[in-house]
Image: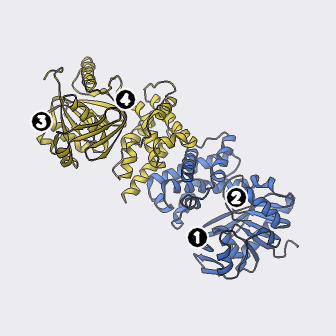
Chain colours: A blue, B yellow
């Protein structure tokens, strides 16, 4: 298959993220296959729905739904919407579903997620990061509520593409996403982009869990707002020390950006309420370790991580 | 009344602390008067009870209970067990109940509580700090559960006593407390002693609220234990910068001390659960301000204070 022919797309993990982007691609005419577990029966029977903030209710009545990766047709692009905590067990399954030279795109938050998955994948596969800026959550099996945004930017991590081929590969991916109405652009430096995204994710995810609150009340209280800003500043300092650059006054910009967002409960809040494993390793432990290697202390971030670790352990008992 | 004659004692605020020390003094034969508000009727009818960890159930069936400070006989020593948050409104009442030259003893946690109350009291009154090391809580109106300890150390803050009279005054108070079976000693430097006590109170009170946990689970989880130790170290550094000295390896000692304690829910936990005003100004804001003046940052303590402030404001809504 040439790079310009439309690819066959596999969605691995059909939660809010996988469901949203998969449905958007499918309704634009792409051939999209969804791998599902607990939601398979409902989605096979009733299809997928996205309650879209701008487009209204979107329904994909007939879904290429699969319960078993071994049965799926080989896919050229695999969009991984599963949580980072399951990447280890996903690896053999990704190798199974991948067409020769397939692109595996991790639509996940956190640092080092590609580094951790890479050794578990065949060398012939391209590994990309897909950084999603979207407020969405899964309301029920097969039902995603989209609150705002929907960006998905692509960056190359590793694989068989030579340096000059990588840009073309990314531009092709971006073009296809745009065909599906998804805002997208090429990420030049994936590590930098992951750090930049963490400047939002580290404060808001953990503080929402710890204080049991969505973004609006956290932004309108002077104390929690100051805390969020202080956490952001620690991540900014660590990101700069780890070699990345960031927009000027980035914490102020993110605070203003969050104020324009609808009231939002970050995904980690839902993870804790539903007692699912939270993405503490990718969102907290990995950035803390990287910052420490660069000689930077993040005392508030570490405190947040310690508090969340306690709560997660306590919730398991 | 000479200093050696037994004093008439007034207990202002008969919660766990006031109830415990007041009952211990009364059962040793001191004349003790209790000022009560919501619990007046129950205590006047049924007396006071302390379920004492070592001594079993102690019952004071006939209590000198008062609802109105104006009716109380003038007292030589006033032990203030009310919360620091009500000190402002207590001040005129203390002046009313005080015998000439009375000693007002603040059995309260936090920094600067005497400084804040002093301008509101007549110059003729002695103002002391009473630092209590005790695990106790109020179980029901007039019922205090004592879990362990019961120390009450006395330090002079301000008042008409000359330097050389202060020591004698404190030794007299200590002697009376000891007569009532209360472990007590003289505090040479009240500011230092308050800082030293905060090394325990700042971490355990706030973390218990934030993580919804008593001391045992917090001590047996590696993450929360490390967090408590890091918070302690910040308070130690601030205390040293603010001119006090502390025992060597004080955080390690306090961790070991807490491990020997029964499982305990600090008072601030109860304040939050019962939506009472928590002592955030005395336990967090004042030490943070003092440390800042001394050029010391306490990032984790400030984060804890910000988180608690948010939770308190959210609880009010």
Q: Quick one: label 1, few (<14), some, or many (20+) residues within 10 Å? A: some
Residue linked to disc 1: A148
Instruction: Using the rendered image of the protein, determine whether residue B296 is visible from the camera's viewpoint.
Output: no
CB within 8 Å, label 3 to label 4: no
Chain ID of residue with mark 4: B
Chain ID of residue with mark 1: A
Q: Nearer the viewer, mark 3 or mark 2?
A: 2
Q: CA distance from mark 3 to mark 2?
A: 71 Å
Instruction: Using the rendered image of the protein, determine whether residue B302 is visible from the camera's viewpoint.
Output: yes
CB within 8 Å, label 4 to label 2: no
* Residue B314 horizontal/vertical position (percent): 41, 57
Residue linked to disc 4: B191
CB within 8 Å, label 3 to label 2: no
Q: Nearer the viewer, mark 4 or mark 2?
A: 2
Q: Residue most toward the front?
A: B56
Q: Quick one: label 3, few (<14), some, or many (20+) residues within 10 Å? A: some
In the picture, residue B153 is in which quadrant? top left
Residue linked to disc 3: B73
Chain ID of residue with mark 3: B
Q: CA distance from mark 1 to mark 4?
A: 53 Å
Residue linked to disc 2: A86
């Amino acid at each position: 298959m040439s790079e310009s022919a439309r690819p066959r797309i596999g969605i691995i993990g059909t939660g809010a993220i996988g469901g949203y982007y998969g449905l958007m691609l499918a309704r634009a005419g792409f051939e999209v296959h969804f791998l599902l577990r607990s939601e398979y029966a409902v989605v096979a029977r009733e299809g997928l729905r996205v309650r879209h903030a701008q487009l209204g209710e979107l329904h994909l009545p007939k879904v290429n739904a699969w319960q078993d990766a071994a049965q799926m047709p080989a896919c050229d692009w695999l969009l991984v919407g599963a949580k980072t905590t399951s990447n280890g067990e996903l690896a053999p399954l990704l190798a199974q579903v991948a067409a020769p030279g397939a692109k595996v795109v991790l639509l996940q938050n956190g640092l080092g997620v590609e580094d951790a998955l890479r050794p578990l994948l065949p060398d012939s596969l391209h590994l990309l990061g897909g950084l999603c800026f979207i407020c969405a959550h899964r309301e029920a099996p097969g039902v995603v509520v989209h609150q705002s945004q929907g960006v998905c930017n692509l960056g190359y991590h590793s694989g068989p593409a030579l340096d000059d081929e990588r840009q073309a590969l990314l531009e092709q991916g971006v073009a296809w996403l745009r065909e599906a109405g998804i805002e997208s652009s090429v990420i030049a430096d994936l590590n930098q982009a992951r750090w930049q995204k963490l400047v939002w994710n580290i404060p808001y995810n953990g503080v929402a869990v710890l204080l049991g609150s969505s973004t609006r009340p956290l932004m309108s209280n002077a104390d929690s707002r100051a805390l969020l800003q202080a956490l952001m500043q620690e991540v900014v300092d660590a990101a700069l020390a780890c070699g990345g650059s960031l927009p000027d006054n980035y914490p102020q910009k993110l605070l203003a950006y969050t104020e324009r967002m609808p009231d939002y409960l970050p995904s980690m809040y839902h993870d804790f309420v539903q007692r699912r494993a939270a993405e503490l390793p990718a969102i907290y432990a990995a950035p803390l370790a990287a910052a420490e290697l660069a000689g930077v202390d993040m005392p508030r971030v570490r405190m947040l991580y310690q508090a969340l670790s306690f709560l997660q352990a306590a919730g398991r008992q």
